[in-house]
Image (cartoon, grey):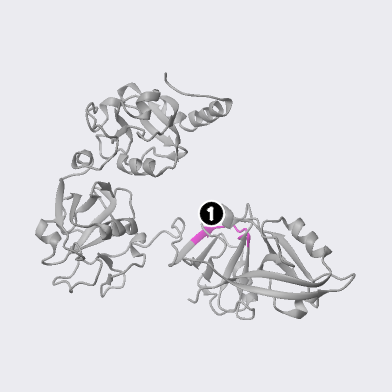
Amino acid sequence: METIVEDQESEYELDKVKKKYASLGHTILMVQLERSNQGLGLSLAGHKDRNCMAVFVCGLNPNGAAYKTGGIQIGDEILEVNGVVLHGRCHLNASAIIKGLSGPIFKVIILRRKTAIDDIAVKPITQFPISLAEEASEEQFSASYPNVRTIAIKKQGNQSLGIMIIEGKHAEVGQGIFISDIQEGSSAEKAGLEIGEMILAVNKDSLVGSNYDTAANLLKRTEGLVTLVVSNPGKRESVPSPLPAATLPVNNAVVENNKNVISKLVTLKPVAPHSRPTTPVPEPIADPLTCTIVPGKETTIEVVTDNKGLGIFFIGGKDTQINNGIVLVEIYPGGTIDKDRRLQPGDQILEVNGASLKDVTNTTASQALRQTLPKMKMSVYRPNNIEYSTIEVDLIKKPGKGLGLSVVARKSGKGVYIADIITGGTADLDGKIVKGDLLISVNGQNIENLTGEEAGAILKTVMGRVSLKLRRYKPTAR
């Protein structure tokens, strides 16, 4: 049985996938697996040519779902799993991705070609452990990384391992977690770890594809005898260049005299200063056209607008009640920012095309953000946690008159917000409500999940004293 297609929807999906990978010129199949407590039972390997990234099936455990279901063969190349593209990725990275998918149903897209088995980096696996628990081992990494070895380090009590790590990229082994320095006299030095080595696994947990925070947390949690699988690219003097994510704020960050040089110490408590300096590592400048926005860090992005508007609604300005920042409230579907897909409500806009928005009026901010240029360069800040102020207002609605405000349904989330306040109206004269406030309740009735029409109808029908509860974005002081 080559493929499992149970309904018309699956057939339609397979047709789309075949068109997507038509350029590969071989058989494209879709197999649906259901992971049980025994696991999928797939052993993966990479391409024997290290310049070619591929995810091959090199073994099928008889106890696993893949073997029992059928449809997947040794030599098949996995292109996608549940819509996540694995084509062109490292097999170890793919393994971590598959483990992280919730399942229990897995739609696996495979490429089948007769000569593929000759391209696999390892021989087909025929011996399997009794348990299907997938553990990272030295043998697993040896086919894809040079000079792989296993190091056992005894961690004494609350003492650290004594290593500094960075998330970086090496010309030979690619992206990963590397050792940038080793504390003199530490357990790591005594065990024989070397500066520049890439950490592939910690206590059987693979770090391939992990970011700095994941690696640091994993290392901090280790106790007793700690087993590391490492690869030495053979360039001890060349510490990999750190990626932007390596500059995320964590405890015990050590900043060198050069402000662009950042390394981080994986430790549970402060340690003595190093007797030798770490190798200076210039931090590469992230591409503002593609870089991601990291919470808790100012990020510069560049958006291609083709001389069209950004398609956003924002609040703030020193002449408003939100006088310490410009905050994004709404992103209009189909607009430039919506298509860019990086900004989100709650983000603060600090600068536009070199002009600071930290201490300007709302009008000035509007003029800056409504420019029509081919590209817009912005410095933005995303809080780790969005904070709100709660506003409670009582307004008197007289017969034949409205409250003097209009609401609009949020297009980028549930609920409605104040889109406009009529000059001289009841809400304007009261002065507590501002455009951009999120409306929570009217006379105690929660309206957070209502449409704009439903919320508007409620506001039109209430009479006399009207109690409104609203939520307002609170900019983080910058």
Q: Position of residue 131 (x, y in %)?
A: 27, 34
100, above or below 340, in the image: above
Q: Can you give x and y, in whole percent of width and height, for residue 202 in the image?
A: 24, 51
Kindly tell me whether residue 202 is visible in this rendering. yes
Q: Of helix, strand and loop, which one carries label 1?
A: loop
Residue 360 location in percent, x, y? 58, 79
How many discs appear? 1
From the viewer's perspective, tell me whether residue 349 is left or right of residue 430.
Answer: left
Does the magenta segment cover residue 307? yes
| Quadrant of the frame with the N terminus | top left
Residue 112 lies in quadrant: top left
Q: Give neighbour class at mark 1: few <14, some 14-19, many 20+ (Cα, 10 Å).
A: few
Q: Quadrant of residue 305?
A: bottom right
Q: Residue at x 19, y 66 (%)?
A: 159
Tell me where residue 436 sits by quadrant: bottom right
Q: Is residue 324 left or right of residue 89?
A: right
From the image, tell me which residue sits under label 1.
Answer: 341
Q: Nearer the viewer, residue 156 or 353?
A: 156
Start-end of magenta stretch? 302-312
Question: In front: 310, or 68?
Answer: 68
Q: Farthest right residue? A: 400
Whether residue 352 is visible, yes or no, is no
Does 403 sit above or below residue 131? below
Nearest the camera: 389 or 94? 389
Q: Is residue 393 magenta?
A: no
Magenta segment's dominant SS is loop
Q: Position of residue 321 (x, y in %)?
A: 63, 78
- Front residue (pair 248, 4): 4
Q: Is residue 206 left or right of residue 1?
A: left
Q: Hey, which residue is sitting farthest top in the picture? A: 1
For residue 263, side relative to residue 329 (left or right): left
Q: Amino acid at mark 1?
A: Arg
